[in-house]
Amino acid sequence: LENCFGIDQQSKSSDKQPQRQRRILTNAKAHIKYIFVQCLPKYYNLIDLIIDTIINDTSLKTKNLSSCLTHLGLLSESINSISLASRPQCFETFDKSKSKIFDFYVKDVLLTKNTIIQFNSLTTFNSFIVEFADESIFKELILPNLEKAALRNSELIFSLVTPNLLNNTLKFKIDLLSIISSSKFLNSLISSLKSSKESVRIGSSISLCNLLNSIDYSITKNESLLTFTNELLKSLKTVTASSIDIKLLFSNVLSNINSNNETVLLNLINSL
């Protein structure tokens, strides 16, 4: 089972061994979630102990951090599956412990240097972030540490973390584009489109597209979208004519800007 938590997300679908591992992993996740949903309403007082066991077990984190992320994500999904009206204790107990999970995410995931983390485990864990990260958590905890982490390990952050983190995360809850556009992280994210590492370039492109696709235009400030567009176009102008693959990545991001704002549209037209 531990080997299945570490399957390569990029493995070919025709490969028999990864296919078998995916089936085992899918079934295991379903069973783990079923156990949580069945047991937690009755033993909700154990939720804090379960979280502590997952995030404080040094040997488990060192051996398989992906397993920790997967279990925390499944626990979060299970809490959300349990009827809040009939079992409020589960949600309340979990909510009181969420700060521990966010601290674990920052310390053991974002700020790690050499640990290998699997894409699918971050996808599962993302269900926790979507449900429990509010504007203050993102601005004061996640974003500042993303900026630090990008300098330490760009491949981890831009290839794995941000494609998940910005994949419709916090949709309709906060103005995520405005928060990122006013930070140093925007420049890091855009600059990574020109990285010498292909995985970083592709991951940054996916992240930026996911960010644009998560926009709620009823709350997003036009000034933020304009800032985002200006920074993107400014960076594009520094790309050499021979770097066709990089220009295609920029083009892909620009094609995801869906705005009726006249200033933004005119800025795009005049700059191309």
Image (cartoon, rainbow, N blue to C red):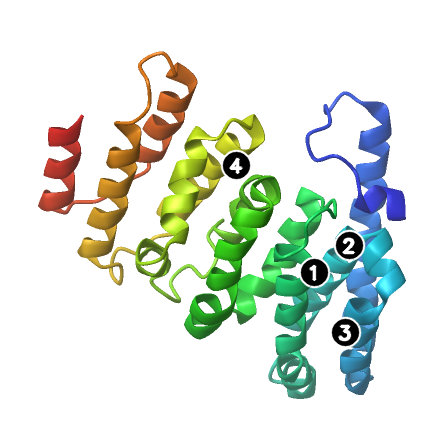
Residue that carries the numbered disc 2 in the rendered image: 65
Q: Residue 108 carries which label?
A: 1
Residue 96 seen: yes
The quadrant where residue 112 appears: bottom right
Residue that carries the numbered disc 4 in the rendered image: 203
Mark closest to the chain's N terminus, 1 or 3: 3
Amino acid on which disc 4 is placed: Gly
Around disc 3, counting alpha carbons within 10 Å, would you say few (fewer than 14), some (14 to 19), or many (20 or more)?
some
Is disc 3 placed on a helix, strand or loop? helix
Residue 161 percent location from the top left of the image: 58, 48
Mark closest to the chain's N terminus, 4 or 2: 2
Residue 192 percent location from the top left of the image: 45, 36
In this image, 109 relative to 24: left or right? left
Mark closest to the chain's N terminus, 3 or 4: 3
- Contact? badges 2 and 1 (CB < 8 Å): yes
Around disc 2, counting alpha carbons within 10 Å, would you say few (fewer than 14), some (14 to 19), or many (20 or more)?
many
